[in-house]
Amino acid sequence: MAYERSLYQMVENEYEELRRHNQEDLEARRRAVYIAVPKIEVIDKEIQSAGLSIVSLAVANPLDMQAKITALRDRQKMLQIRRKALLLENGFAEDELSLRYMCEHCQDTGVRGDKSCECYKRRLVMKAFEKSNLSQQLRSQSFKTFDWSLYSQECDPRYGISPFAAMQNIVEISKNFINDFERTDKNLLFWGESGLGKTFLSTCIAKELIKKGYSVIYETTYQIVSLLEDYKFKRSPDLSELKMQTERLYESDLLILDDLGAEFSTAYTNAALFDILNSRLITNKKTIINTNLSMQELSDRYSERVISRIMGSYQALQFIGEDLRIKTSVNHFQQK
Ligand SMILES: [Zn+2]
């Protein structure tokens, strides 16, 4: 699976910028060294002119070329040793007059042999994260940081299952969703009261899929609705950006629609929102919806037809338990 082309372009630009920065950085250091130790500038000029002489000898090809070139090379080596000693004597680093790289492996080209450098792959994932809209805080969450102790193991008689067991089941389904992402035609609907880990879990899924190279967009329904309205009423100085953002809602491999039902909706935004969901179903792009509303409340709010269309292709998973945000803050308080 490959990322969007624009993402690669952005990363390439970053490397270009990085190399320009390295060069400027070197020039600044060079100026400082020449001011502090003028002798080094003289040596550098001599090394350079020896280099030029070697080139012109090779081109002219005289009989004693080899001997002359060897002599010039020896002279260069000697000058380089002298230069290094002068740098160290004057409190500079040995590599003060060399380019310094963020990544020594690829010298900030992003390429190593005929493969992408590890640093390139890392940058690509970072960029994909930035574009996904996941906040810094959400990006630090993962299945590993999942706090199981927040879910009671006591059976809740209303559901005939403990929040812990219910959550285990949901996490299992989520992991399968990630592993079968390419094959599954399943979408997920996380529903239940707020503060039970719906956003947490959906961002865990987002993270794993981004790392695998899928394009993921995380948006609250509120944000999507404002975007759709801005697009309709052309409320932006940059309409092409607005168009691109809207298109990505249709085209990303995974769309996470957070907090469905919390938006201020109109007939227009409802229709536009469900157009996105519907065309994603048709093109087999996966969606995860989070909502605090019950199935009944969803049907009341949106049309019955729309909801039944969704229900048919989404696996609805109910989150049960006590509000974790209250629970975590109580734990935090008790630890103090
Ligand atoms: Zn590298």
Image: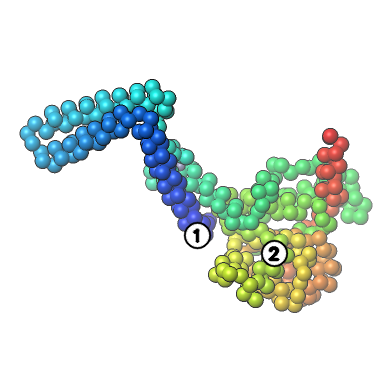
Identity of the residue drawn at 71% across and 42% down: 145
Image height of 330 relative to 84, above or below = below
| Separation of marks 1 and 2 at Cα, in angstroms | 23 Å
Q: Is residue 115 visible?
A: no
* Residue located beneath label 1 in the image: 6
Amino acid type at image mark 2:
Gln
Amino acid type at image mark 1:
Ser
Image quadrant where one finds the C terminus: top right
Relative horizontal placement of residue 227, taking residue 128 as reference (left or right): right
Q: Quadrant of residue 267?
A: bottom right
Dot 2 lies on which element?
helix
Relative horizontal placement of residue 87, taking residue 119 as reference (left or right): left
Dot 1 lies on which element?
helix
Q: Which mark lies nearer to you, 1 or 2?
A: 2
Q: Which mark identifies residue 318?
A: none
**Residue closer to the observer: 147 or 82:** 82
Identity of the residue drawn at 39% across and 27% down: 94
* Residue located beneath label 2 in the image: 223
| x then y, percent, for residue 87 | 37, 26
| x then y, percent, for residue 164 | 82, 46
| x then y, percent, for residue 142 | 68, 45
Q: Earlier in the sequence, mark 1 or mark 2?
A: 1
